């Protein structure tokens, strides 16, 4: 292996020298994840290097955000279900009232 292939490269996120074997080229990162990373490191371009430690942290952050969104969606779905149950109960009560007083 040549000397340049093992020479440390500077990670564009943490700015630390890293082994060329523990890096990721930004251009190979899934576009949605790269967009997320660029919000925190706007100077990145597709040729930039990101160390695997930072890459792993970004992936962990994204996973955490997805879990949060899933939790919020589940909560909203449950609340919507409760509201629908209340609407159905009110409709049933309204129909019973109308029948009782001959309004139907
Ligand atoms: Zn780094």
Image: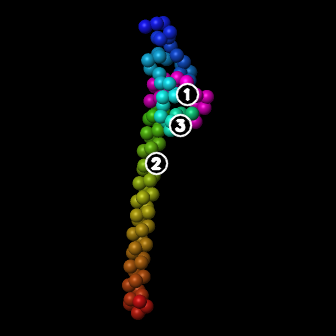
Mark 3 and mark 2 residues within 8 Å of each other at the beta carbon: no
The image quarter containing residue 95 is: bottom left
Q: Nearer the viewer, residue 88 or 47?
A: 47
Residue 61 lies, in percent from the top left, at: 47, 37
Residue at the spot 45% in from the left edge and 46% down from the top edge = 68
Residue 26 lies, in percent from the top left, at: 52, 27
Nearer the camera: disc 3 or disc 2: 3
Q: Secondary structure at mark 3?
A: helix
The image quarter containing residue 87 is: bottom left
Mark 2 and mark 1 residues within 8 Å of each other at the beta carbon: no
Nearer the camera: disc 3 or disc 1: 1
Vertical arrangement, residue 99 with respect to residue 38, above or below = below
Q: Earlier in the sequence, mark 3 or mark 1?
A: 3
Q: Residue 2 magenta-drawn?
A: no
Q: Residue 44 magenta-drawn?
A: yes
Magenta span of residues = 39-56
* Separation of residues labelled 3 and 2 (CA atoms): 15 Å
Q: Which residue is mark 2?
A: 69
- Circle on res. 36: 3
Vertical arrangement, residue 58 with respect to residue 11, above or below = below
Nearer the camera: disc 2 or disc 1: 1
Q: Earlier in the sequence, mark 2 or mark 1?
A: 1
Q: Which residue is mark 1?
A: 46
The image quarter containing residue 103 is: bottom left
Vertical arrangement, residue 39 with respect to residue 19, above or below = below
Residue 59 lies, in percent from the top left, at: 45, 34
Residue at the spot 47% in from the left edge and 24% down from the top edge = 24
């Amino acid at each position: 292996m040549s000397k340049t292939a093992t020479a440390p490269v500077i990670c564009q996120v943490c700015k630390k020298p890293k082994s060329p074997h523990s890096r990721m080229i930004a251009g190979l990162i899934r576009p949605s994840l790269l967009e997320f990373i660029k919000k925190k490191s706007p100077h990145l371009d597709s040729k930039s290097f990101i160390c695997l430690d930072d890459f792993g942290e970004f992936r962990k952050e994204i996973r955490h955000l997805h879990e949060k969104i899933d939790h919020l969606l589940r909560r909203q779905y449950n609340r919507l279900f409760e509201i629908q149950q209340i609407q159905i109960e009110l409709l049933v009560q309204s129909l019973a009232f109308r029948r009782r007083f001959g309004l139907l």
